[in-house]
Image (cartoon, helix red, strand yellow):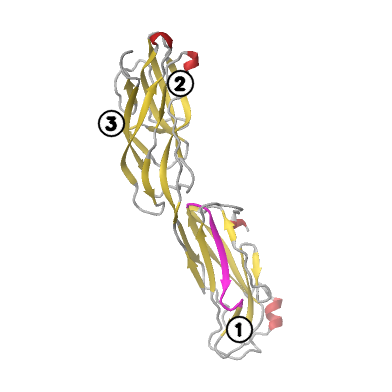
């Protein structure tokens, strides 16, 4: 009795990156950096991860007056607690750890002067060496990550650094919020289906209208429209027969449908399209119920009286006045 439609559009996660805010005014060592990283399209419903995407960032060391310069830096990336299982690999080892405990991360030691597993170590060389260098690393986004179309994937950085020529060291690990963000084109993917028993009132040919109206719970059937989406979406409901059950050459039997806080019937058949906030990859249930308004005792007999409800679910780029639809 229910027909579901679904669709896909494209959404883009914007990129912003600013690595290592140095404290030049305080004459401390530090690094700055910018990049533009794109790791391709991501379908959150695909069983495949985005893997082995090599990216790079160009770092510029902080310099002071009189030949003061940043000599070397030890750092790793961090992600918020509860994040998907992203990976950032440098020289074959993971350099991404989860805040706030950073479990598994090596100690950040300003006196470390060589590459250690689990860290990124860079040495700019002496005062005559270039003040910029490029660091290459590999990023993986796992399958099934619940990413929002139109958002970003931000990572923080924790670092220590060593100065030369009189530029002060930074010996206590510092955190740079949102230091590096991935630019991923996330498909505004949507899946929808009907979940529940058939909306079937059963045999009503011997039941009169007063009996139906006197026991509404007895003549109510319920199910759910299940939606999973990476972005906001809109929902519309339509009845092929304006909320009456009918059969060829037979009478009609009125019913009503309640969905997303709206109750529609032959007297009020027009359903207002509703905009909903993202459902997430795990999905949400949108309750749908139908209730008989008439009995069939006075109707022309027929094998089946029926109607078709169409629920149209459409992904949106902009949420607009989106609501928490499961709560309506």
Rounded to the nearest angstrom, the CA distance separating label 3 from label 2 is 25 Å
**Residue 186, placed above or below residue 131:** below
Q: Secondary structure at mark 1?
A: loop
- What x and y, as percent, mark residue 111? 35, 15
Q: Secondary structure at mark 3?
A: loop
Crowdedness of circle 1 by 10 Å Cα count: few (<14), some, many (20+)?
some
Say which label, 2 or 1, has the lower sequence index: 2
Check disc 2 and report the residue beneath it. 22
Front position in the image: 294 or 35: 35
Is residue 107 something that shows in the picture? no
Check disc 1 and report the residue beneath it. 204
Locate residue 133: give its quadrant: top left
Locate residue 184: give its quadrant: top left
Say which label, 3 or 2, has the lower sequence index: 2
Check disc 3 and report the residue beneath it. 91
Front position in the image: 225 or 321: 321
- What x and y, as percent, mark residue 268? 67, 72
Rounded to the nearest angstrom, the CA distance separating label 1 from label 3 is 72 Å
In the image, residue 265 lies in the stretch drawn in magenta: no
Say which label, 1 or 3, has the lower sequence index: 3
Instruction: State yes or no: discs 3 and 2 in contact (Cβ < 8 Å).
Output: no
| Region in magenta | 230-243
**For discs 1 and 3, the disc positioned in front in the rendered view:** 3
Rounded to the nearest angstrom, the CA distance separating label 2 from label 1 is 77 Å
Furthest residue toward left: 92
User: Relative to residue 96, is residue 207 drawn left or right?
Assistant: right
Crowdedness of circle 2 by 10 Å Cα count: few (<14), some, many (20+)?
many
**For discs 2 and 1, the disc positioned in front in the rendered view:** 2
At horizontal 65% and vertical 85% (from top left) the residue drawn is: 207
């Amino acid at each position: 009795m229910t027909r579901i439609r679904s669709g896909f559009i494209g959404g883009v996660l914007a990129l912003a990156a600013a690595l290592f805010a140095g404290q030049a005014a305080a004459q401390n060592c530090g690094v700055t950096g910018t990049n533009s990283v794109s790791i391709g399209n991501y379908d959150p419903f695909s069983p495949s991860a985005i893997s082995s995407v090599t990216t790079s960032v160009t770092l510029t060391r902080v310099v002071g007056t009189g030949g003061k310069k940043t000599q070397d830096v030890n750092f790793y990336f961090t992600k918020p607690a509860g994040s998907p299982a992203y990976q950032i690999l440098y020289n074959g080892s993971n350099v991404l750890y989860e805040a706030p405990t950073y479990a598994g991360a090596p100690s950040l030691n300003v006196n470390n002067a060589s590459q250690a597993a689990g860290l990124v170590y860079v040495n700019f060389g002496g005062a005559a060496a270039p003040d910029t260098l490029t660091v290459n690393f590999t990023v993986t986004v796992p399958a099934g990550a619940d990413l929002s179309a139109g958002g970003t994937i931000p990572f923080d950085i924790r670092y220590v650094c060593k100065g030369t020529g009189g530029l002060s060291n930074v010996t206590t690990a510092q955190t740079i919020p949102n230091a590096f963000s991935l630019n991923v084109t996330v498909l505004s993917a949507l899946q929808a289906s009907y979940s529940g028993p058939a909306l079937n009132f059963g045999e009503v040919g011997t039941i009169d209208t007063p009996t139906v109206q006197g026991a509404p719970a007895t003549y109510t059937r319920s199910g759910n429209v299940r939606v999973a989406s990476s972005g906001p979406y809109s929902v519309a409901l339509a009845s092929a027969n304006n909320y009456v059950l009918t059969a060829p050459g037979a009478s009609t039997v009125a019913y009503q449908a309640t969905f997303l806080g709206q109750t529609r019937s032959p007297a009020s058949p027009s359903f207002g399209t509703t905009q909903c906030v993202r459902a997430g990859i795990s999905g949400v249930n949108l309750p749908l119920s139908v209730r008989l308004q008439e009995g069939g005792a006075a109707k022309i007999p027929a094998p089946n009286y029926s109607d078709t409800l169409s629920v149209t679910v459409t992904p949106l780029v902009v949420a607009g006045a989106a609501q928490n639809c499961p709560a309506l």
